[in-house]
Image (cartoon, coloured by chain):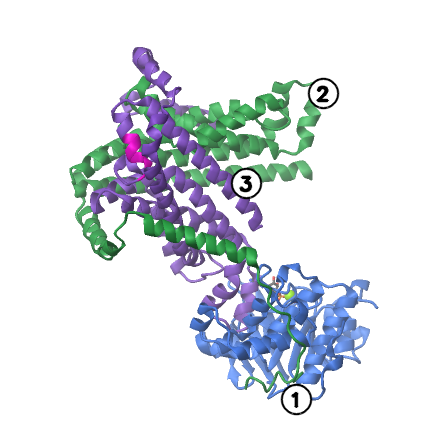
Chain colours: A purple, B blue, C green
């Protein structure tokens, strides 16, 4: 039964007549001569581009850091606001709904629109990352609060505390490890995302990628990809190390 | 373990509160009736145990007294306040005067012991001050003394999660004491502890009653603890009071009447 | 009031000194400095930020006050193209990840197979899908098929990792039993590991699809088609009332798919837990 449904959906989504994906192996054959030559260039990274990458790479990293930091600042109160134990009132549903909407818009779509609004540069990039991170961090942290033991909150109420007092003095240290770990995770994702935001004009390496792609400099492109690869993996390793120490 | 040996005795509390329940009925939202018309009076400074099987309504009764569970009908009076008529800031103020201890300790495991005990100062602290994370010198001093009086001052900067069960319950008692309460409620405070620790925590509670003169109401499901540590015993069965009299002279027959079944070995702690 | 009731002991033992955790302080300081340096060095006129809220209001007004509903049919059609891309990408990606992920699990294949596979996953994880699409389109052209392929290849990075992690989490006994009965690698995977890991993997595959729905809209921005393509066009020509419609459709479709897929995932996992109980009882 399930298999039938899965196959049916797959068939529908591959029917070009219905707007599905046209699986066009013929195109590959047609483009092969041309394309394979370019792909071959990918295997010969061109180091001469490197000096030009340092500045945008730095900008990429800075956007990632600032985006993660700003979203972390906002995510802490929002997470407490979005979880049941730390916010038993109705307003919780509102926060969650807004965040679901924020999460439903893909990162580069934010960037495209924000670039048109506030102009080319790092600012639309940072705002994009903040929105992107908020969606992830608040969701994961508030779910962690929801599923954690919250009996200490009852003690706070019994002592005559307000919810805000309880959240500040006890829920905060209680949530801290999960929160810090999710913020690190968002930083990891940010580096990946912010390296391509420039494709739509939002600063960082993406602008350079767009340029070398425009001139078919595939050797340079592969050098930049290698660079992103090294940075992303380095950040992932560092963040995994820090996360282990948080426990 | 008992740390009361250095404490001067007989200094009365500023004013313990009496507790009066009148025809209190508690019906939970799902329709279960926790209390069916309970009436009783506890004088200021009494040490009373509430005994009954699991599900008899002990927790419900104790939670109704500090308003954690709202009474469906009837009157709950604690000291000068009618708890069931209050809400918001006034209710929090009354709760500040009522300390509470839980079976599961209810500590924030990842927070320091200091911060856990500081919770007891909530009702004396404006919310914005808590938000800023600054505690007054007086609050700090009260926290330290409360920890000292249960013998846990040494650990003040450690994490609550690193303590043993008995130590956690002592910290929880310190948290309640730092409220400077007029009444102390305890919901099965020793049910998660081994027998020697259970006795020493019960002694601590007893001291709260004798040395500070607080009104103490403690839920127990073990008959020997009720006999040994409290003067008066209230028996609950299916949400109704079925016994109210002296604890030490309560007979096995009285307990069988409360439990509604013959006495079993698990009804006593032993030792 | 403050001292009246707590007169139990007028004097108390000295409290231990609060320990200074130098390591923690140093870490906090470092993080603070890095963030500060990034904020200061980044080329953003922080003073212009004051105008941001007004700007945002202005544009939100342009987009959502009077959306151009005549674009609705086209918007839905293009979103459907994106969703198709996401689905095909998920199917291809999950099949490839399963084939590559199982041998990457500890205890299935030898180290010299495992390590290169894991390396491949790590590399694919690090490269954004957009870049994979840019590379692929040199041979496949600017078509939704390229988008689907990019999603599939990019998905192998994460989904391959999830696959071997899930399989490694399967209790050792089941695989042992098949191996003891003389099963080879394929038979161990088919009869020992697959039944135990399948629900989790199915759930992850659906999750992959949810992620792809978002990413496919992004891929449209480089021209492979779908709602992202349409969005770039209208944004460049600043037809904000059409952009508004597109965003509303994207949000509605994404949230609907999330809700349906999430419900199915929860059911799969609940069924799996029930079966687990059957086995242990
Ligand atoms: N939050 C609640 N919602 C619904 N029913 C409850 C709740 N708490 C307790 N009850 C029910 O009320 C009755 C009394 O429970 P309780 O006061 O916890 O008894 P005890 O503490 O003596 O074990 C039980 O039948 C219990 O199931
Ligand atoms: Mg109980």
**Mark 1, mark 3: which one is toward the viewer?**
1
Q: Is residue B78 visible?
A: yes
Q: Position of residue B118 (x, y in %)?
A: 56, 71
Cα separation, mark 2 vs mark 1, equals 78 Å
Element assignment for label 1:
loop
N-terminal of the pair, mark 2 or mark 3, is: 2
Marks 2 and 1 in Cβ contact (< 8 Å): no
Q: Position of residue C114 (x, y in %)?
A: 58, 25
The 10 Å Cα crowd at callout 3, few under 14, some 14 to 19, many 20 or more, is few
Drawn side of residue B184 relative to residue A82, left or right:
right
Q: Quadrant of residue B50?
A: bottom right
Classify the position of the C terminus of chain B by image quarter: bottom right
Report the disc number at residue B12: 1
**Residue sticking out furthest to the right:** B271
Q: Chain of mark 2?
A: C
Residue stretch rendered in magenta on the structure:
A204-210
The 10 Å Cα crowd at callout 1, few under 14, some 14 to 19, many 20 or more, is some
**Mark 2, mark 3: which one is toward the viewer?**
2
Marks 2 and 3 in Cβ contact (< 8 Å): no
Magenta stretch holds residue A240: no
């Amino acid at each position: 039964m399930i298999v039938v449904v899965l196959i049916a959906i797959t068939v529908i989504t591959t029917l070009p007549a219905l707007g599905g994906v046209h699986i066009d192996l013929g195109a590959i054959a047609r483009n092969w001569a041309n394309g394979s030559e370019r792909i071959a260039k990918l295997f010969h990274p061109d180091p001469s581009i490197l000096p030009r990458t340092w500045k945008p790479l730095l900008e990429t990293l800075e956007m990632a850091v600032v985006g993660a930091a700003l979203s972390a600042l906002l995510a802490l109160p929002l997470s407490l606001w979005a979880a049941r134990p730390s916010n038993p009132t109705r307003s919780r549903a509102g926060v969650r709904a807004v965040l679901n909407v924020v999460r439903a818009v893909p990162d580069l779509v934010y960037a495209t629109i924000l670039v048109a609004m506030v102009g080319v540069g790092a600012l639309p990039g940072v705002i994009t990352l903040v929105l992107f991170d908020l969606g992830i961090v608040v969701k994961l942290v508030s779910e962690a609060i929801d599923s954690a033991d919250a009996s200490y909150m009852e003690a706070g109420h019994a002592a005559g505390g307000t919810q805000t007092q309880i959240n500040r003095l006890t829920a905060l240290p209680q949530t801290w490890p999960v929160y810090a770990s999710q913020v690190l995770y968002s930083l990891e994702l940010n580096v990946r995302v912010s390296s391509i935001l420039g494709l739509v004009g939002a600063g960082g390496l993406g602008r350079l990628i767009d340029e070398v792609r425009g001139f078919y400099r595939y050797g340079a492109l592969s050098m930049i990809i290698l660079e992103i690869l090294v940075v992303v993996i380095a950040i992932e390793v560092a963040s995994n190390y820090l996360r282990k120490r948080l426990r | 373990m008992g740390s009361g040996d250095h404490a001067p005795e007989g200094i009365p509390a500023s004013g313990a509160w009496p507790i009066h329940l009148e025809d209190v009925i508690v019906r939970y939202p799902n329709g279960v009736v926790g209390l069916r018309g309970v009436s009783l009076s506890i004088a200021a400074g009494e040490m009373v145990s509430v005994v009954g099987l699991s599900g008899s309504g002990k927790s419900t009764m104790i939670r109704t007294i500090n308003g954690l569970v709202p009474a469906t009908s009837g009157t709950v009076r604690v000291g000068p306040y009618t708890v069931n008529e209050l809400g918001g800031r006034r209710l929090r103020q009354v709760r500040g005067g009522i300390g509470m201890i839980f079976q599961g300790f209810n500590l924030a495991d990842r927070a320091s012991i200091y911060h856990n005990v500081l919770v007891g100062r909530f009702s004396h602290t404006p919310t914005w001050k808590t938000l800023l994370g600054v505690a007054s010198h007086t609050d700090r001093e009260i926290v330290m003394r409360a920890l000292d009086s249960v013998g846990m001052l040494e650990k003040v900067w450690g994490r609550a999660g690193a303590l043993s069960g008995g130590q956690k319950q002592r910290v929880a008692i310190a948290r309640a004491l730092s409220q400077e309460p007029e009444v102390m409620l305890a919901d099965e405070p020793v049910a998660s502890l081994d027998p020697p620790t259970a006795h020493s925590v019960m002694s601590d509670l007893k001291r709260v009653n004798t040395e500070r003169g607080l009104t103490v109401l403690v839920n127990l499901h073990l008959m020997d603890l009720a006999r040994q540590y409290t003067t008066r015993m209230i028996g609950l069965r299916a949400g109704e009071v079925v016994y109210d009299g002296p604890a030490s002279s309560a007979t096995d027959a009285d307990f069988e009447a409360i439990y509604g079944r013959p006495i079993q070995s698990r009804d006593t702690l032993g030792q | 009031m403050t001292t009246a009731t707590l007169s139990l002991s007028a004097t108390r033992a000295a409290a231990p000194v609060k320990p200074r955790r130098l390591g923690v302080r140093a870490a906090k300081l470092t993080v603070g400095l890095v963030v500060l340096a990034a904020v200061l060095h980044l080329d953003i006129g922080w003073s212009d930020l004051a105008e941001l809220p007004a700007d945002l209001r202005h544009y939100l007004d342009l987009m959502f006050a009077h959306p151009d509903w005549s674009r609705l049919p086209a918007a839905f059609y293009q979103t459907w193209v994106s969703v198709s891309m996401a689905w095909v990408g998920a199917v291809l990606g999950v099949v490839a990840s399963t084939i590559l992920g199982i041998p990457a699990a500890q205890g299935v294949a030898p180290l010299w197979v495992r390590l290169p596979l894991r390396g491949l996953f790590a590399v694919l994880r690090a490269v954004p899908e957009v870049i994979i699409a840019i590379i692929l389109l040199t041979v496949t052209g600017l078509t939704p098929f390229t988008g689907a392929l990019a999603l599939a290849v990019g998905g192998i990075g994460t989904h391959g990792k999830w696959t071997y992690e899930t399989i490694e989490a399967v209790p050792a006994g089941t695989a042992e039993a098949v191996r003891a009965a003389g099963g080879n690698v394929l038979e161990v995977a088919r009869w020992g590991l697959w039944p135990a890991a399948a629900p989790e993997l199915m759930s992850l595959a659906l999750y992959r699809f949810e992620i792809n729905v978002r990413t496919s809209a992004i891929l449209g921005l480089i021209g492979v088609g779908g709602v992202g393509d349409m969005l770039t066009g209208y944004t460049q020509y600043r037809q904000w009332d059409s952009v508004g419609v597109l965003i509303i459709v994207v949000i509605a479709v994404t949230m609907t798919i999330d809700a349906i897929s999430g419900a199915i995932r929860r059911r799969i996992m609940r069924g799996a837990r029930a079966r687990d109980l059957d086995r242990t009882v």
